[in-house]
Amino acid sequence: MKKSFLLFSMFIFALVLAACGGGTNNNEASNDDTGANDEAYTVEHAMETTTIPSTPERVVILTNEGTEALLALGVKPVGAVQSWLGDPWYDHIAAEMEDVQVVGTESAVNLEAIAALQPDLIIGNKLRQEEVYEQLKSIAPTVFAETIKGDWKENFQLYAKALNREEVGNDVLTSFDDRVEQISTDLGDQLQQEVSIVRFLAGDVRIYHKDSFSGIILEQLGFARPAEQDVDDFAEMNVTKERIHAMEGDILFYFTYETGEGDATGVQNEWLEDPLFQNLEVVKNGRVHEVSDAIWNTAGGVIAANKMLDDIEEVFLNE
């Protein structure tokens, strides 16, 4: 009987031990599941309030500045509209966009290509794609920014929220603002120089004001602008040569939207060689600089903003 009792006791002990071990395994599995399953969240945007079931993994982005936002937030899209310049991406993001599917342009998105990618989030823009919003939301939860303008940070914050990466987004913006503050400190009295911004396109010449991509960044840095450009709107467009005097400044940056056919470059050369342009003091002083249209204007996102700061440092701090 003593032997039977001993065996019975050992059997009960083994059962208890196994139960304890099983409990530990179940808790570990539960912790793993908690990390993998996100809760649904809502995003208020230009069209309505949209519920996103969980942190998206397959994202389609329908604007150029939005593409840069995703990359900066650590998200590689499965699909994106092609860049306005490049084949199909801007040079400064091409390496990061390898294997990303082109889904049309900002002005003409390809709904079939988007649906084929089976996204779990689509990010677009009311200004560009309002007419196809209903079709897009039938494919996947869709979030739209209101418009595209010089202040890229507003849209960036919306994208970070839609991606459930607000903390990362705050870090990106803080890093940019800290860099601007440091450059401003380094520039010192050079900020008193009036910076002129000019753009050449096929059939159009523009003088850029403060509410443009480059204008917003120049203002955050603290640069002065020529009186003719110190205006709270986008740009003076369809400029005639009688307005060349409005391009005057202590330093002038110009960029050209050249798509490869040479028309915009032809306009650029015609204007730069014009006697009225050559008579500007900024030209006589040798302070005219050509910069990238993609970086200073067209891309319009956080990566381009940082690269524009690179140009500012190169020109002003390394002259």
Image (spheres, grey):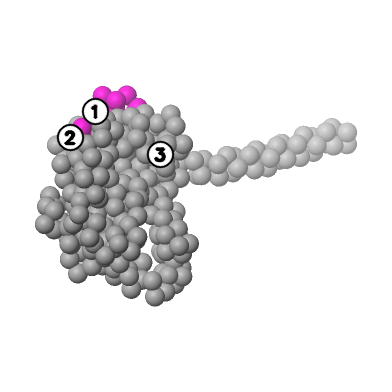
SS class of the residue under badge 3?
loop
Q: Which mark is residue 244?
A: none
Task: Answer whether residue 151 is visible to the viewer in this image.
Answer: no
Rounded to the nearest angstrom, the CA distance separating label 3 from label 1 is 26 Å
Report whether 169 appears left or right of 204: right
Q: Residues within 10 Å of mark 1 (few under 14, many from 20)?
A: some
Q: Residue at x 18, y 62 (%)?
A: 246
Amino acid type, residue under disc 2 in the picture: Val
Q: Nearer the viewer, residue 64 or 187?
A: 187
Q: Start and end of the magenta stretch? A: 108-119
> Disc 1 or 2, which lies upstream in sequence?
1
Furthest-bottom residue in this view:
189
> Disc 2 or 3, which lies upstream in sequence?
3
SS class of the residue under badge 2?
helix
- Number of numbered tags placed on the structure image: 3
Q: Which residue is mark 2?
A: 132
Q: Residue at x 63, y 39 (%)?
A: 25
Q: Residues within 10 Å of mark 2 (few under 14, many from 20)?
A: few
Q: Which residue is mark 1?
A: 111
> Disc 3 or 1, which lies upstream in sequence?
3
